[in-house]
Image (cartoon, helix red, strand yellow):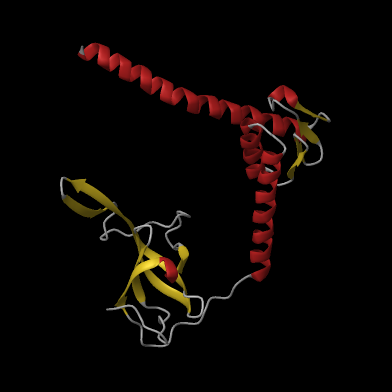
């Protein structure tokens, strides 16, 4: 079916397929549609990416991920699905797969207090990252801050130092020995987080190195 013309709307609950200007094919259920702004909200069922492959004078179009397989939600929870806002001004194709004629089910109740707190936390997190970059904090310091913040939310920047629970200060270069504060459970806990963080970083570095060594060994044996 062709895309709705002026004055027509996408019915909530309908299944539609969109091809964006970036070559991404989105297929999902209509959650909401605002006609004046041409913003379409979809609960994603399928997602794929169009690719162009040239062979001589022939151009073939293919799909990176097939339509026969549902795309798992990014949250990893099977009872949830990803919801995206699609600006139809940047969509080249819109097809209605199945229209919904009956009255859509009532909207779920939203916990506005939880949403406000989540938005505030996300904003504070982004501002914290921006501050660290503007203050010239090293990449190692930024990564450590993110690791600590996953476990301890009461974590903020104090110039280039990381202040945890107003009790522990971690100064550059952000090693275990740079954790200062009153001896006790808080300082001990933060030190363990820092120690584990850098141990994990080192282990991640050793993986590519081990793979490279194995590749060299295999090459030597094959020769």
Front residue (pair 145, 109): 145
Q: Quadrant of the N terminus?
A: bottom left
Residue 211, image x, y percentages: 37, 23
In this rendering, position of residue 125 left or right of residue 20: right
In this rendering, position of residue 151 left or right of residue 6: right
**Residue sitting at 67 percent across and 39 percent down?**
133
How many numbered dots are placed on residues in this image?
0
Q: Is residue 10 above or below residue 85?
A: below
**Residue sitting at 55 percent across and 28 percent down?**
201
Query: On the image, which quarter does residue 151 sit in?
Result: top right
Residue 90 seen in this snapshot: yes
**Residue sitting at 48 percent across and 76 percent down?**
32
Q: Is residue 185 above or below residue 120?
A: above
Query: On the image, which quarter does residue 19 sit in?
Result: bottom left
Q: Is residue 148 above or below residue 89?
A: above
In this rendering, position of residue 163 left or right of residue 112: right
Q: Quadrant of the C terminus?
A: top left
Residue 54, image x, y percentages: 21, 47
In this rendering, position of residue 136 left or right of residue 107: right
Front residue (pair 120, 113): 120
Residue 90, image x, y percentages: 42, 66
Name the residue at the right extreme: 182
Name the residue at the front extreme: 57
Front residue (pair 175, 97): 97
Front residue (pair 43, 182): 43
Residue 42 seen in this snapshot: no
**Residue sitting at 40 percent across and 86 percent down?**
8
Query: On the image, which quarter does residue 95 sit in?
Result: bottom left
Residue 65, image x, y percentages: 29, 53
């Amino acid at each position: 079916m062709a895309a709705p013309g002026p004055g027509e709307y996408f019915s909530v609950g309908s299944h539609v397929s969109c091809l964006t200007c970036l070559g991404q094919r989105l297929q999902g259920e209509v959650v909401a549609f605002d006609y004046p702004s041409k913003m379409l909200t979809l609960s994603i069922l399928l997602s794929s990416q169009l690719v162009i492959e040239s062979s001589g004078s022939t151009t073939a179009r293919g799909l990176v991920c097939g339509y026969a397989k549902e795309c798992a939600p990014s949250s990893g929870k099977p009872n949830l699905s990803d919801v995206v806002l699609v600006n139809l001004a940047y969509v080249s194709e819109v097809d209605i797969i199945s229209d919904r004629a009956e009255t859509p089910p009532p909207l779920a109740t939203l916990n506005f207090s939880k949403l406000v707190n989540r938005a505030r936390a996300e904003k504070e997190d982004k501002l914290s990252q921006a501050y660290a970059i503007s203050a010239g904090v090293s990449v190692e310091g930024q990564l450590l801050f993110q690791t600590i913040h996953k476990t301890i939310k009461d974590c903020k920047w104090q110039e280039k130092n990381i202040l945890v629970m107003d009790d522990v200060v971690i100064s550059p270069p952000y090693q275990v020995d740079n954790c200062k504060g009153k001896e006790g459970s808080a300082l001990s806990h933060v030190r363990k987080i820092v120690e584990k963080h850098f141990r994990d970083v080192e282990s991640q570095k050793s993986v590519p190195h081990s793979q490279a060594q194995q590749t060299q060994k295999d090459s030597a044996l094959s020769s």
